[in-house]
Amino acid sequence: MFLNRVLMDAAANTDPMSEGAQNIINLINSIFPWALGIVIAAGSIFSIILGVKFAKAEEPQDREKAKQHLKNAIIGFVLIFVLIMLLRVLPTPLLNWAQGK
């Protein structure tokens, strides 16, 4: 069965690796909106919670600690957002580069 598939691919001049890579790219494209929505929702909720903690802090050290947590959370969510966007943009050019196009 596998040999027949390989022979058919060779006869049709198709690369099974590029077909598999295209399937992975399609999977990433179908998951993208869900992942982006989850990151945005989680980031918003977490930032609101940390902002409320910052506003409620009465002691200066608690206020500084809450401010640092809020900064770290925002930086983390921005990094996650950028990485998700790169995951959306980079696969096709990398596939073209690997195929020598």
Image (cartoon, rainbow, N blue to C red):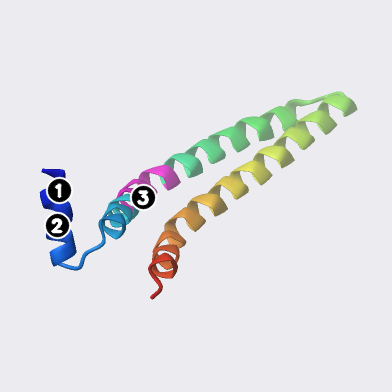
Amino acid type, label 3? Ile
Say above or below: 58 vs 89. above
Q: Determine which quarter of the picture holds residue 52.
A: top right
Q: State the residue at coordinates (34%, 46%).
A: 31
Cβ atoms under marks 1 and 3 closer than 8 Å: no
Seen at 14% across and 67% down, the residue is 12
Mark before the other along the chain sequence, 3 or 2: 2
C-alpha separation, residue under disc 3 versus residue under disc 2: 29 Å
Mark 2 surroundings within 10 Å by alpha-carbon count, few (fewer than 14), some (14 through 19), many (20 or more): few
Q: Quadrant of the C terminus?
A: bottom left
In the visual, does 23 lie left or right of 65? left
**Residue at the disc numbered 3:** 28
**Separation (CA) of disc 1 from disc 3:** 29 Å
- Mark 3: secondary structure: helix
Magenta span of residues: 27-36
What secondary structure is marked by label 2? helix
Q: Amino acid at mark 1?
A: Leu
Instruction: Give the residue number, with chain letter if any, for mark 1.
Output: 3
Circle 1 SS class:
helix
The kind of secondary structure the magenta stretch mainly shows is helix
- Residue at 61% x, 49% y: name it: 78
Q: Are marks 2 and 1 in contact (CB under 8 Å)?
A: yes
Q: Nearer the viewer, mark 3 or mark 2?
A: 2
Residue type at tag 2: Leu
Tell me residue 40's x, y (percent).
Answer: 49, 44
Q: Which residue is mark 2?
A: 7
The image position of residue 10, as x and y in percent, is 18, 63
Which of the 4 image quadrants contains residue 13? bottom left
Q: Nearer the viewer, mark 1 or mark 3?
A: 1
Image x and y of residue 30, in percent: 30, 49
